[in-house]
Each structure stands twice: as structure tokens, then as C-alpha cells.
Image (tube, rainbow, N blue to C red):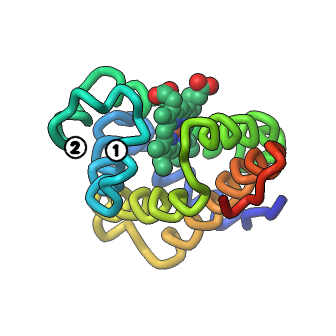
Amino acid sequence: MEKLSEKEKGLIRDSWESLGKNKVPHGIVMFTRLFELDPALLTLFSYSTNCGDAPECLSSPEFLEHVTKVMLVIDAAVSHLDDLHTLEDFLSNLGRKHQAVGVKTQSFTVVGESLLYMLQSSLGPAYTTPLRQAWLNMYSIVVSAMTRGWAKNGEHKSN
Ligand code: HEM
């Protein structure tokens, strides 16, 4: 597993300090962007069939629950920057669960773009190139671990 520099860890921790206190609103910004970039992802949520459009879905309790879950995983990663390897089993199992509901590993790239969009719109001028890179590196560690869940299922990881 790759490692983050101390400087990167500091940038991530400092920026998450305020964002992490308001997880759901920031998660909604992230998922609104995700569904703008790839509206087809909306259909992967089985409970989304009753939603007319993304804003409607994003205000439904089931969706908000998933938004909260995603933000809690990010929160766990930020809390474990010094020992991210301890999340390996949890994250690879989480990947396996996403494979089971029809998510493709490529979609995590779009999720990453949406995460950066949320950081940029929330942090404003504090969103610098080193900060963006630090978050990208952390996200890539999380996604690599989740992607190993696909391989565990005996399928090619790019499926
Ligand atoms: C392509 C984007 C994604 C899609 C379409 C997606 C879809 C789903 C679906 C359909 C479920 C099962 C129903 C539910 O619990 O709401 C689920 C569960 C979950 N998702 Fe996602 N997800 C995505 C990205 C993520 C990401 C990036 C994370 C965290 C980094 C995440 C964290 C979770 C967690 C923690 C659960 C609960 C797993 C459990 O029940 O043990 N999801 N996701």
C-alpha cells in the first residue's frame, strides 16, 4: 500500500476538519456532481426507481443514507492516515459489495472527480494544487483497496 507524506496528511486533516463536521451537505454536493457527470449511475441504486430525477433522489432518505455512508468511509480514511492498511479488509469487502450491486471499477474515477469538485467548491482559495494532489493520493489508496475486492471475486479488476 502506498504512503502519504506528512505534508499531505496535514493538508488532508486540516481541510477535513471543517468539512467533516457537515458531512451530509458536502456529500450531497459530491453526489449531485457525480450524477451530472454520469447519470447512469443513478440506476444502480435499486431504490432509485421511484425518483424522477437526481435532485429528487438526493433528497430521499435511502440516498442520504448512502451519502452518509460514503462520507463516513472518507472520515475513517482521514482518521487512519498513519495506518491506512488497517482498513484494507474493510475496503476490499466494500469493493466486493459494490461489484455485487453492479458498480464498475471505472466509475470510481468519476467519484474521484466529484470528490475533488466538492473540495474545490467548499474550500475555495484553500483548494491548492498540493491539496488536490494529497486528496487524490488518499483517494487512490482507498480505491485501490476497494478494487482488490473485485479481484477477490475472481473477476478481472477492470470489469
Ligand atoms: C459509483 C458510485 C457508487 C455507487 C453507484 C454506489 C452504490 C451503492 C449501493 C447500491 C449500495 C447498497 C445499498 C446502500 O447501502 O445504499 C452501496 C452501499 C455502500 N456504499 Fe456505495 N456506491 C458508490 C460509491 C461508494 C463509495 C465511493 C463509497 C465509499 C468510499 C461507498 C460506500 C458505501 C458503503 C459504506 C455502503 C454500505 C455497505 C454495507 O452495507 O456494508 N459507496 N453503495
Residue highlighted by disc 2: 54
Q: From the viewer's side, name the closer residue of 25 and 55.
A: 55
- Tell me which corner region of the image, top left, top right, bottom left or bottom right, holds residue 97: top right
Considering the numbered disc 2 on the image, is that residue within a helix, a strand or a loop? Answer: helix
Q: Please name the residue shown 73% across and 59% down the image.
A: 157
Instruction: For mark 1, give the secondary structure.
Output: helix
Q: Which residue is mark 1?
A: 42
Label 2: few (<14), some (14–19) or many (≥20) C-alpha neighbours in 10 Å: some
Q: Position of residue 154 (x, y in %)?
A: 83, 48
The residue that appears at 44% across and 39% down in the rendered structure is: 20
Residue 2 is labelled as none
Residue 5 screen position, x and y as percent: 73, 67
Residue 148 higher or lower than 75, as above or below: below
Left or right, 46 with respect to 4, comes to: left
Q: CA distance from mark 2 to mark 1?
A: 7 Å
Contact between labelled residues 1 and 2, with CB atoms less than 8 Å apart: yes
Where residue 83 appears, as percent x and y from the top left, is 80, 45
